[in-house]
Image (cartoon, rainbow, N blue to C red):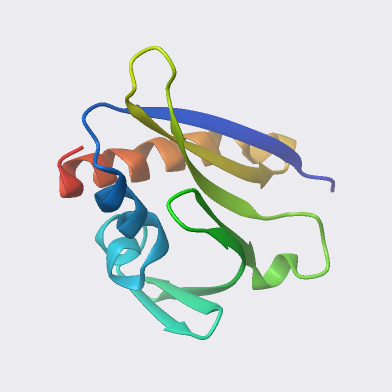
């Protein structure tokens, strides 16, 4: 079944660019809010939750801007997930734009999952 692209923007008032960048681009930062543990071997990131493990490849990254991963199961497809930092023009605050893909029946669950994870990011990093 074909997946649909989803973009979700989270405004992060008073976020520090350095803190946010480290939270989305390093194993230690990702382990604070995205997964229980994260290990990195080159461009291969292994994310672990309880007894579940999933591997993604870092396919693109631009310093202080975005990281784009592709789950191993999505290899050779157009599907990925991306975490992109943007500055909001009016307020100057930072926002995190999450791009992900889901099958139509899984879209609401995926959005709820991202909402939960970003709430953890806010709590753990103080943004």
Q: Nearer the viewer, residue 102 or 106?
A: 102
The number of numbered badges drawn on the structure is 0
Q: State the image coordinates of residue 112 (x, y, percent, origin top left).
A: 45, 35
Residue drawn 84% across and 45% down? 2
Q: Nearer the viewer, residue 35 or 24?
A: 24
Q: Is residue 50 visible?
A: no
Residue drawn 31% across and 56% down? 23
Q: State the image coordinates of residue 109 (x, y, percent, origin top left).
A: 53, 38
Residue 56 lies left or right of residue 11; in this view the side is right
Q: Give the vertical position of 115 relative to 34 (above or below).
A: above
Q: Quadrant of residue 3?
A: top right
Residue 86 lies left or right of residue 61; in this view the side is left
Residue 106 lies left or right of residue 41; in this view the side is right
Residue drawn 21% across and 30% down? 14
Q: State the image coordinates of residue 87 (x, y, percent, origin top left).
A: 42, 29
Image quarter hosting the C terminus: top left
Residue drawn 74% across and 54% down? 79
Q: Give the vertical position of 33 relative to 92 (above or below).
A: below
Q: Give the vertical position of 8 relative to 76 (above or below).
A: above
């Amino acid at each position: 079944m074909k997946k649909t692209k989803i973009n979700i923007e989270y405004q992060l008032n008073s976020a520090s660019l350095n803190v946010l960048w480290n939270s989305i681009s390093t194993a230690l930062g990702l382990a604070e809010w995205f997964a229980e543990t994260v290990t990195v071997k080159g461009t291969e990131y292994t994310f672990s939750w309880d007894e579940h493990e999933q591997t993604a490849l870092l396919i693109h990254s631009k310093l202080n801007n975005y990281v784009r991963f592709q789950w191993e199961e999505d290899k050779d497809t157009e599907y990925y997930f991306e975490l992109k930092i943007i500055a909001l023009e009016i307020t100057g605050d930072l926002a995190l734009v999450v791009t992900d893909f889901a099958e139509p029946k899984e879209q609401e669950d995926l959005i709820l999952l991202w909402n939960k994870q970003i709430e953890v990011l806010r709590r753990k990093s103080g943004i």
